[in-house]
Image (cartoon, rainbow, N blue to C red):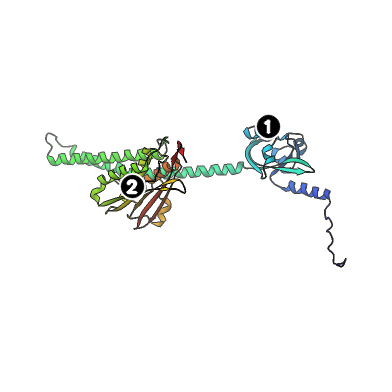
Amino acid sequence: MNKSTARKKPAAILSTDQKSQFFIQFIDQIKDEVFLIKQNGQIVFVNKAAAKGLGCSTKKLLARNIFDIFQEDATVKMWKVSKFSAVKESKDPLHYAIKWKTTRRKVQTVETSLSNFDLDGQSFILLIIHQIDQRLQEEHAERELQKNQAIQTLIAGAAQEFQYPIKGIHEKAQALLDIYQGRDFEYIGFKDYKNIFGALKNMRDQAKYCEDTIERLLLFQKKKIKLKVGYCDPNEVLRSIIKAFRDQYGLYQIKIKVKLDSKVKYIAMDEVSFEQIITSVATNAVQAMPNGGEIVLSSKYLKDKDTCLIECKDNGVGIAKDALDHVFDPFFTTKQRGLNKNSGLGLSMVRDIVNRFKGNIMLKSHLRSGTQISIYLPVYKNGKAK
């Protein structure tokens, strides 16, 4: 090989001092606060952003210990006692959200990233701090906005829910007053008697509807929903519910089929809660078939997931595609509102209860083709949900 064509070792473009100077200048351009500290917390390097963020000169910071600038909590105590042993043992940077104290007498929440850093044979901790107060404020504002929107939805739904029954009570009461308040009641004929008691019965039913809706609202707001330690045999509860529904809806040409898996195990949900969710789901299915139809309730043990699957299928009116994203929203319903109708709270409460028992619920539906609801519930083993 010719000397002219032989590869030459590239000459170093930057000296060691130049590289060091470049590194320092580069770190100083970073907006996040950067510290290089010893295992005992002594600060050996800070960038300009750190001095600015703390409102302290670089010279003063180099004379301080890193633990002095943080508000002491469990994380800072752990760093101090262990001398950053967790950081030294970790291959990846460790992240913590803690608070630090500026000389401007402000306490700010910061996100820290710590990693091991070897320099000239010595081991240091590279600490990078990112201010997250603004992000937390924005997240808080977003949560408040969502909360207000949820409250507005709840208020609007409640107003719509109570509007018709209360209006009905008022109209019936006013009608009775208009007819009878000026009359002599020495004698009331059968027609009058029937009219009065019919109006009272209607008013009672409307008031009961309001009472039931308030009860559901309280449940939905989790003021009365409490996790009960226990378990139940889902097949046994399903048989009981099916019998009750056959007795109740037998005259409405609704057939109820049952497919129960004998391999189904106990589920980690108490009997009352399980009966509540299945009754609500089955009621929705019945109300989706005003002209009759078929409901299939089934249970199945999923061995690969060690989970119990409960399904309810109907061939009712189904749900339009654009409404599927809202079926679990409070007060959303595809059916008519009012007395003996749907309040729109059923599936909201079902999902709430299922989630609280570490389960999952899914819904599939097509307009005029029926609906299928699948509920996955944890198996009860060794005194806890597995």
Residue 127 percent coordinates (x, y): 70, 41
Find numbered disc 1 in the image and state the secondary structure of the residue it sits on. Answer: helix
The numbered disc on residue 282 is 2
Q: Name which residue type carries label 1.
A: Val
Res 55 → quadrant: top right
**Can you give x and y, in whole percent of width and height, for residue 350 in the image?**
39, 44
**Residue ID for mark 1:** 81
Q: Residue at x 18, y 41 (%)?
A: 195
Q: Check disc 1: other Cα within 10 Å, few if <14, some if 14-19, many if 20+.
A: few
Residue 213 or residue 180, whichever sits in front: 213
Give the quarter of the image for residue 183: top left
Outermost residue to the right = 3
Q: Quadrant of the N terminus?
A: bottom right
Residue 198's spot in the image, x, y percent?
Answer: 20, 41
Residue 53 placement, left or right of 367: right
In percent of the image, x 42 and y 43: which residue is there? 354
